[in-house]
Amino acid sequence: MPAHVIALANQKGGVGKTTTAINLAACLAERKHRVLLIDLDPQANSTSGLGLQPQPGGSIYEVLLGHQSIAGKIQNTRMPGLSVIPSEVDLAGAEIDIARMERYLHRFKEALEPLIHDERYDIILVDCPPSLGILTMNALTAVDSVLIPLQCEYYALEGLSVITRLINQIRESGANPGLQLEGIVLTMFDGRTNLAQQVMNEVMTHFGDKVYRTIIPRNIRISEAPSHGMPVILYDDKSTGAEAYRLLAKEFIKRRKSAGAQATASDPEPSSSHEAVPPSPPAAV
Ligand SMILES: Nc1ncnc2c1ncn2[C@@H]1O[C@H](COP(=O)(O)OP(=O)(O)O)[C@@H](O)[C@H]1O
Ligand SMILES: [Mg+2]
């Protein structure tokens, strides 16, 4: 089976894209899936958060320009089953260099092609920068689906409508006709605030079963782990944050299986994860 490729995207910074990319990738690897995380953000937070030093020439930049092969960019992490293509600050130049090239929206898709078909990975996660620039547009043109991390704050829904509209436009324009919304993950959730509760209810009303039932709570261990170069399951195995991301990985796999079944079976079994009822808020951390 070719790898399933998913972008973690939201034009807003600080909403948990990188944290979710690292920790979902690690928890999927823990469940024996073969996972590759591609860091497409020049800030290289996924790279350092997995314990790698950003190195000049180490990113996907030269691959996007068509000068080098993607296989040479893959590095192992200390998490068995999880590989990474790191980023570094030079990748910022790609925004300008790629814009001048032919088929500039398809550079990442073409770069990925060999990895998707060699069956080396089950899942490829792409951590996008906090903008809708050329790198994010390249990711959205290349991936099968988009997972949107969302922080329950004021204006969250407005931001969400921007990215979901863009997904529809990219699909309808023919740039990526198969592009799907994988789901929306509520992050840094603080159930003690009315605002978080309200935003959660509104997102559930608008997006129903696209909203993951697993909610990632605000948790100090999650925020500490990257400075130790580890996903939270390695940094503090028993923490609330580790538990939350393990549950997220479990739900992710369940949803993937049910999406696969719906694609192949004419009469798929209804899945309980498709009820449009608000999940109960997580325990206070
Ligand atoms: N569940 C969480 N609990 C506590 N801190 C978090 C959580 N998720 C993310 N953070 C912190 O919030 C900040 C922004 O998260 P990050 O994943 O880097 O966002 P993005 O990639 O969308 O810019 C980081 O300092 C990160 O450690
Ligand atoms: Mg980030």
Image (cartoon, rainbow, N blue to C red):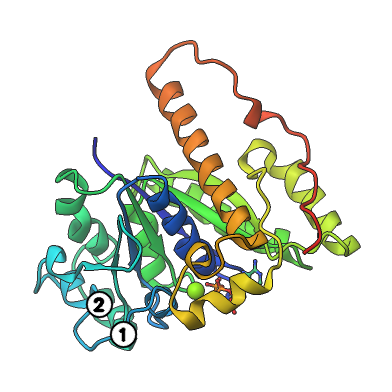
Depicted 150 relative to depicted 210: above or below: below
Farthest residue, direction right: 194
Q: What's the residue at 19%, 84% (across, down)? A: 57
Reading the image, the residue beneath label 1 is: 54
Reading the image, the residue beneath label 2 is: 59
Q: CA distance from mark 1 to mark 2?
A: 8 Å
Instruction: Say which quarter of the image contains residue 269.
Output: top right
Depicted 3 relative to depicted 132: above or below: above
Q: Quadrant of the N terminus?
A: top left
Identity, as a three-letter code, of the amino acid under mark 2: Ser
Foreground tag (1 vs 2): 1
Left or right: where 202 falls relative to 54: right
Instruction: Say which quarter of the image contains residue 87.
Output: bottom left
Depicted 66 relative to depicted 158: above or below: below
Q: Is residue 60 visible?
A: yes
Q: What's the residue at 58%, 59% (across, down)? A: 242
In the image, the residue with mark 2 has its CB under 8 Å from the nearest atom of ligand 2: no
Q: Earlier in the sequence, mark 1 or mark 2?
A: 1
Identity, as a three-letter code, of the amino acid under mark 1: Pro
User: Where is residue 26 shown, x and y percent of the image?
Assistant: 43, 58
Check contact, mark 1 vs mark 2: CB within 8 A.
yes
User: Where is residue 128 shown, x and y percent of the image?
Assistant: 43, 68
The quadrant where ligand 1 appears is bottom right
How dense is the environment of label 1, judged by Cα within 10 Å: few (below 14), some, or many (20 and up)?
some
Left or right: where 141 falls relative to 104: right
User: Where is residue 248 shown, x and y percent of the image?
Assistant: 57, 48
Left or right: where 145 falls relative to 225: left
Left or right: where 243 falls relative to 55: right
User: Where is residue 73 shown, x and y percent of the image?
Assistant: 18, 70
Q: Is residue 130 visible?
A: no
Q: Quadrant of the C terminus?
A: bottom right
